[in-house]
Amino acid sequence: MYRLEEPTYFYLLLVIPVVVLIFMLSLWVKKRRQKAFATSNLLAKLSPDTSLFKSVLKMLSVSLALAFITIALVNPKMGIKLKTVKREGVDVVFALDVSKSMLAEDIAPNRLEKAKQIITKIIDKLGSDRVGIIVYAGNSYPLLPITTDLAAAKMFLQNANPDMVSSQGTAINEAINRALTFYDNKDQTNKYLVILSDGEDHESNTIELAKKAGELGIKTFTIGIGTEDGKPIPMRINGIFNGYKKDEKGDVVISKRHADVLTSIAKEGNGAYVDGNITDTPVDFMKDVIINAQKSEFETKQFSDYKDQFQWFIAFAILFLFFDSFMLEKKTYWLKKIDLFNESK
């Protein structure tokens, strides 16, 4: 397991293309001046030992040395010991609705982005709890398995969008069905499923699945995003607005929030429904729920005793700089005899 101590130094790698560009320009200028002085055949006779290959090799040596120096500054570290850490917490799985209706802009900037903001802020309130993410529309997709890596959860969350799910529509039952097998700790006494949606649901067995989840110890909370009046669903191609979604009759579809559906799901799932239009409302609510929950102990494995590895890259950099310093730009005798580039012809 590796860890990068100072990844910002990777920007120094941009120096290498500059070095290559300067080398190419100097070579071009040099060739132009030589042509003004004499013909190619005459230059070959005046300086028979000049080697383009050696010049390129020296430039590559300097570039590689710069690359290794940059990596040394980044200071990659390697974990040499795997240890088991005992923690206490709850398992929270977020089911994010990524159907097209979540692109409606009745809540700024749109319903989907508002849902992401809420999830991110709830994650920020978690301690040693574990988190997982499911995205769904017409079917569901496990975006992130249950993990203690909260930073990774937020990173994966930012990439959630309607294109991730092959089948459009809204099937909350798919999210609940996926959640039934998502929790990987049988001894966990507190399992929370948090569904963020506008409440549009095209399936009939969602309530039964929520009840089944409750019987299995999974408490289902729902967070409603959107307004009762609703808004049309904007359609975009490559980020460019291309009108609003229409039904089979050609009428513009108005997507509304269905709080009653979400309330029924939460009630059968032994949880609660929360209005998500004001970000802090569901964030504070879920924070209180998780804080007051009975914590279960679980074990996680992580690398420890990270050791610096920069010295190896420094050694390679010195090796290439040493090679560059002692390599002349003249042709070597044995290479001249081989005549790789047919220069004698």
Image (spheres, helix red, strand yellow):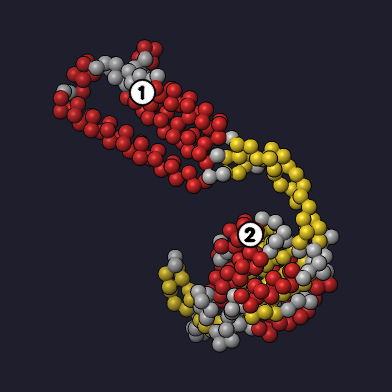
Q: Position of residue 241 (x, y in %)?
A: 43, 73
Residue 230 found in image quarter: bottom right
* Label 2 neighbour load within 10 Å: few <14, some 14-19, many 20+: many
Disc 1 on helix, strand or loop? Answer: helix
Marks 1 and 2 in Cβ contact (< 8 Å): no
- Image position of 64 with respect to 40: above or below: below
* Location of mark 1 (residue): 54
Upstream in the sequence, badge 1 or badge 2? 1
Q: Position of residue 65 (x, y in %)?
A: 45, 31
* Location of mark 2 (residue): 153
* Label 1 neighbour load within 10 Å: few <14, some 14-19, many 20+: some
Residue 44 found in image quarter: top left
Front residue of 345 and 315? 315
Q: Give the residue displayed 59% in from the left and 35% down from the top.
A: 309
Tell me the amino acid under the disc marked 2: Ala
Is residue 136 visible to us here? no
Front residue of 236 and 126? 126
Quadrant holding the C terminus: top left
Q: Give the residue displayed 62% in from the left and 42% down from the top.
A: 2
Front residue of 294 and 42? 294
Q: Position of residue 208 (x, y in %)?
A: 78, 77
Q: Position of residue 129 (x, y in %)?
A: 72, 61
Question: Quick one: which residue is furthest to the bottom in this view?
Answer: 229
Q: Which mark is residue 44?
A: none
Quadrant holding the N terminus: top right
Tell me the amino acid under the disc marked 1: Lys
Q: Give the residue displayed 81% in from the left and 58% down from the top.
A: 297
Q: Give the residue displayed 77% in from the left and 70% down from the top.
A: 292
- Image position of 44 with respect to 280: above or below: above
Distance between mark 1 and mark 2 Cα atoms: 50 Å
